[in-house]
Image: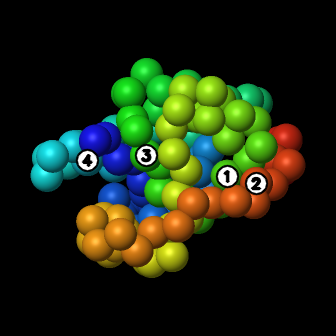
């Protein structure tokens, strides 16, 4: 099971903006790796670019605060489950996931389309 979480600059806290997160934490079987988000500085299309990056990393689960509709479409087409982040740190989110305390993200925003 591969789990991804968007990270802030400190590489510990969950970033609230998925597409423009500076980093992604990807965990698999207790092993953790941090990757730069190639979409973080994109002029446009950051959501779809970030989603494609996660698909290319073959994740199974994304834990995020919020997610745009375009990103959700890409991830759902790849059978990636999208869960709602409720904690400050990625480590807290991973513990909540392991304890079965995470819920699916059900509401997706229309996107920011160049507005930050």
Residue under pointer 4 = 27
Q: CA distance from mark 4 to mark 2?
A: 24 Å
First in sequence: mark 4 vs mark 1: 4
- CB contact under 8 Å: marks 1 and 2: yes
First in sequence: mark 1 vs mark 2: 1
* Callout 2: SS: loop
First in sequence: mark 1 vs mark 3: 3
First in sequence: mark 3 vs mark 4: 4
Residue under pointer 1 = 67
Whether 101 is drawn above or below 115: the answer is below
Q: Identify the image quadrant of residue 77.
A: top right
Residue at x 35% of width, y 47% of height? 3
Residue 14 percent coordinates (x, y): 45, 65
Residue 2 percent coordinates (x, y): 31, 41
Q: Quadrant of the N terminus?
A: top left
Residue under pointer 2 = 108
Q: CA distance from mark 3 to mark 2?
A: 16 Å
Outermost residue to the top:
56
* Callout 3: SS: strand
Front position among marks 3 and 4: 3
In the foreground, 41 or 65? 65
Residue 25 percent coordinates (x, y): 34, 49
Residue under pointer 3 = 61
Q: Residues within 10 Å of mark 2 (few under 14, many from 20)?
A: some
Outermost residue to the front:
100
């Amino acid at each position: 099971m591969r789990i991804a979480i968007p990270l802030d600059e400190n590489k510990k806290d969950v970033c609230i903006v998925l597409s423009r997160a500076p980093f992604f934490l990807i965990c698999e079987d207790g092993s953790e790796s941090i990757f730069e988000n190639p979409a973080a500085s994109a002029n446009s299309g950051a959501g779809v670019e970030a989603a494609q990056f996660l698909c290319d990393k073959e994740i199974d689960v994304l834990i995020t605060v919020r997610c745009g509709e375009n990103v959700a479409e890409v991830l759902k087409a790849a059978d990636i489950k999208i869960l709602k982040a409720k904690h400050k740190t990625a480590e807290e989110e991973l513990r909540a996931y392991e304890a079965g305390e995470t819920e699916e993200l059900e509401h997706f925003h229309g996107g920011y389309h160049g507005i930050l």
